[in-house]
Image (cartoon, rainbow, N blue to C red):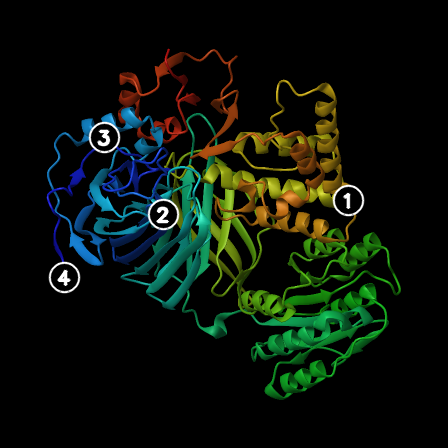
Amino acid sequence: MCRRFPSRLALSLAGCAVFAASAQACRIIEPIPRPIHHPRPDRVLPMETKRHQADIEVQGPVATVTVESVFHNPNPVRMEGTYFFPLPAQGSVDRFSLWMNGEEVQGELLDADKARKVYEDIVRRIKDPGLLEYAGRGMVKLRVFPIAPNGDVRVRLRYRHVVPREGELYALAYPLGSARPDGDTAVEQASVRVRVRGQGPVGTVYSPTHKVDVTRPDARTAVAGWEARQVRPEREFLLYWAEDTGDLALRALTYAPPGEDGYALFLIAPQVDADEREAAAKDVVFVIDRSGSMQTDDKIDQARRALVYCLGRLRAQDRFNVVTFATGLDRFREGLVPATQENVAAAQDFARDVAASGGTAINEALAGALSMLGDSDHLPMVLFLTDGLPTVGETDPDAIVKNVASANDARARLFVFGVGYRVNAPFLDRLAETGRGARTYVKPEEDIEHKVSVLYNKVASPVLTDLDLACEGVRLREMYPHPLPDLFRGGQLTVLARFAGSGMHAVRLTGTAAGAQATYTEEVAFEGGSAEFLAPLWAARKVGYLLDEIRLHGENEELVSEVRRLGERYGIVTPYTSFLVVEEDAPAQARRELEEAQMTARRDWHRGAGVGAQAQARSRLGADLKQAESLAAPATAPAGEAGMAMDSLSRAERARGVSRRQVKRVGAKTFVLRDGVWTDTDYDPDAGLPVERVEFLGDAYFRLVQEHPRLAAVFALGDKVVVQWRGRVYKVHRDG
């Protein structure tokens, strides 16, 4: 049963300015101890966020957002706090409640004419620019009391708003960054679920900020979900989608900084309910390593199960064969056979009888597979799985790569699976690159069957192959991925490029569908736009390709300089942009050791042995960057597998107590912390641009925030900021 708030609880809907980026609202701030029988604590701990959950239902253009948060009081006395939540423009709250003593208490919306002044006073008093990041929106404010000692308070909010459109795409923004708690604590559990119910078929679904899982219960419905534990949300959650009526969705987003070439993102996806028979027929040869080393760790059993699964997924119009290899080859049939029920069942029996023994004749196995595809009139594919190095016949990796390229007259796609750490990662990467396929590595503790089946499910039904993307009226350049990969049923292709020009122009996608040429056209507005995230995404893709070139073909000054420039300009961590901060009083010997460690780390990146966990980690980083679709890609942080490549550097840093320089991205801009000042990497002190000094939290500070809402997220970095903005330089300073 719900009741009104008691008089000591106040809720107001404030039409004040609060900004869109990585805000710190949607939390309880200013915790004030209210002890009864206990003494006031010497130190007040900030409120913690145990759970932040957003459930969003979109029907047509209207989104209904239900937010539920659970906050924890880690102090031994009762606390009072203030809860803030930013609302989108024209957002309408229809329910706001909290739970006290197990009972839901419903709030009442009160008028707040002086909300902006009150809000700015709060920001000035607690000196937290992060609270300003959602200016330009409405705000919900709630005084919460009492919060029991070591107790929880649960808050639920529901509001509705119209989802805006950018071109042909709907663009939903949810202020997930505002869930970040005070202090250094993380949110124990955070999640966002968006269910889109379209008036027509829902086509492309894409998030540039978070890695989402998308399911499609039917053609008119798509569900996108994101979830994480022990996380500090850094940015708002963005989701784009389109409603489509054609056979294939081709949608675009553009962004052009003033005076620069623009960035374009093209989202390409086949209609989700396309008839299975429309997928292109394929010729597939499965090439499976059965050398003696496959006996260990249950690898041969897993490989057999994976092969049986893939054979069962063949379609009636496909043809196939199976080649297993060790010291020699063993073929299911001499050539390709149609995927009839009888042939598939016989091949599965053949797969179940595969036994492991002998050496590793990789060159002979791939040559034999490609010879079967020479006269293929379907889409030719080779799925190649191995756990070792070539030991029989031709063993030189360079020679094998050349032999494969020479024998691949059919231009077969080569999908490579490297099992364990004994494989030569650069060698397998080059095979996949030569065959316009993909590489996947299976760690010793991972399931081969699962990894193989996941990739095969993606490539089982080709819809459009041999793609080409072009535009009349503007010049597209530096397009990634290059060349464009094939498009499969249920899949989605994300293409990023730079463009020169402006205005409405036709973008044409051509390819081969079911053996015939197909063309799809979309009118795209090449203009400024607001999708600033396109700049770092494009840069991540380019860095991925450059790192692969360096790793596979050797280092040269031009490539290294370009990687370093992109890394520093767009805030992408690479082996050449480690963002080191060396303490000023560090002895000269320590500096030299750090420099040597950094040089060693860079050398190891591209000259290191091709066998082992680090080699595969470097391969995965390059592949992830080349396919980056969101700012959550490994490009944005030096953690995880990317850090493995610079272990020696990290050890030297830890030994000398050196920290990595902090790097933050705001929209298309990157800021580096230099001498305590967040400095725009675009800033050139020699450019002669006019400079305006802005006192932190002064009148001019708030005036600029109101006049230029995008500056708010920049100013929220801290009390010392230098930013180059529309032909001027603003230097935020403190106390004169």
Mark positioned earlier in the residue sequence (4 or 3):
4
626 on left or right of 268: right
Q: Determine the secondary structure under disc 4.
A: loop
Q: Mark 3 points at which residue?
A: 119
| Nearer to us in this view, 210 or 296 | 296
Among the 4 quarters of the image, the one containing residue 73 = top left
Label located before the other in sequence (3 or 2): 2
CB under 8 Å between callouts 3 and 2? no
Q: Mark 4 points at which residue?
A: 1
Q: Residue at x 19, y 58 (%)?
A: 103
Q: Residue at coordinates 80% horizontally, 54% vertically from top-left?
A: 402
Mark whose residue sits in front, 1 or 2: 2
Query: Going 14% across and 58% down the picture, which residue do you hit?
Result: 2
As drawn, the residue found furthest toward the right would be 393
Q: From the image, tell me which residue sits under label 2.
A: 49
The label nearer to you, 3 versus 2, is 2
The correct choice, above or below, for 141 with respect to 116 in the image is: below
Q: Counting residues from the N terminus, which is met first, the one under dot 3 or under dot 1? A: 3
Q: Where is residue 520 in the image (x, y as percent from the top left)?
A: 44, 55
Up-down relation of residue 23 to residue 680 (above or below)? below
Camera sees residue 592: yes
Give the CA distance from mark 4 to mark 2. 25 Å
Are the residues tagged 3 and 1 within 8 Å (C-beta)?
Answer: no
Q: Tag 2 or tag 1, which sits nearer the N-term?
A: 2
Residue, disc 1: 608
How many numbered discs? Answer: 4
Pointer 4 and pointer 1: residues touching (CB < 8 Å)?
A: no
Q: Is mark 1 on a helix, strand or loop?
A: loop
Amino acid type, mark 3 = Tyr
Are circles 4 and 3 on residues that touch, CB within 8 Å? no
